[in-house]
Image: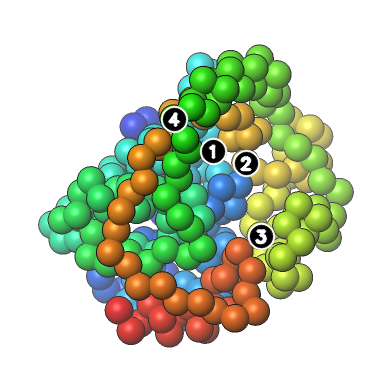
Amino acid sequence: MLFDVWGLKLHAIERGQGRPTLLLHGWLDHAHSFDLLAPLIAGRTVALDFRGHGDSQWVGAGGFYHFIEYVADLDEVCEQLSPLEPVRIVGHSMGAAAALVYAADRPGRVEHLTLIDAVPLSIPTQEVPARLTSYLLDLRKTPRNRRRVESVADAASRLQRNNPSLSARAAQVLAEGGISPDPEQDGMLAWKWDPLLRAHSPLPITEDVVQHMTVHTVPGAGHHVHLDAPEQVASLIAKR
């Protein structure tokens, strides 16, 4: 399914029926990162590709990926998905951080929030000037052509090199859903995400977002807990 959000087409994977649970992936991940967890969640699930990720549109020339824009996108998606009732949200990493800020700002729109390996995004105030400098430098040096890979196996191997805690199963799922032929590079395989996503954002959150929450630990799981132990994560979600 597609959401028309501020002029961008945002892709989502819909499963089941009933009241929706919105699934939000992490930075440089995609909606397919919930392929193992979504079928285990009761009712209807909608796994969103954030702007510039997966099969959603990239921002146009002059655009950028400020963290707060993910929150704005989330607000519009919730309005279209469930205009009359609050939604349940399951977010991982960056998706969880965006959902946490959204829930703090619009508590009446969120029935329940599950955060998977995430904390509020915040930096000390004194780091803001350096972050702004990095942002200006990144705008000049970041190319927009997609980064090529040789195969799914190559993509999975790269993911595990960048994140040694990533299991082979998690890397395979992320690689399969994260690459596709690039028509601008003679159909060679390349990452789907917009390279501009790797540039620093000059708009960090500088105050901690305080929330009442219950913390559960899943032994043996890495950062992608929902891929390493989907059954346990689904069980914890069902209890809330």
Label of residue 174 in the image: 3
Secondary element under disc 4, as helix, strand or loop, is helix
User: Dot 1 corresponds to which residue?
Assistant: 52
Q: Earlier in the sequence, mark 2 or mark 3?
A: 3
* Percent position of residue 132, x then y: 53, 20
Circle nearer the viewer, 4 or 1: 4
Q: Is residue 231 above or below residue 63?
A: below
* The quadrant where residue 160 appears: bottom right
Residue name at image x 42 percent, y 50 percent? 120
Q: Nearer the viewer, residue 200 or 1?
A: 200
Asked if the residues shown at circle 2 and circle 1 are in contact, with their CB atoms under 8 angstroms apart, the answer is yes
In the rendered structure, the answer to whether residue 36 lies left or right of residue 67 reads right
Q: Residue at x 42, y 63 (%)?
A: 115
* Residue at the image position 40 percent from the left and 36 percent from the top: 206
Work out whether 40 lies above or below 46: below
Residue at image mark 4: 125
Residue 195 vs 13, above or below: the answer is above
Helix, strand or loop under label 2: loop
Q: Amino acid at mark 4?
A: Thr
Q: Secondary structure at mark 3?
A: helix
Disc 4 vs disc 2: Cβ atoms closer than 8 Å? Answer: no
Determine whether label 3 and label 4 are within 8 Å by CB.
Answer: no
For the residues marked 3 and 1, what is the alpha-carbon distance in whole angstroms?
Answer: 16 Å
Q: Which residue is mark 2?
A: 193
Image quarter hosting the N terminus: bottom left
Dot 3 or dot 4: first in sequence order is: 4
Quadrant containing the C terminus is bottom left
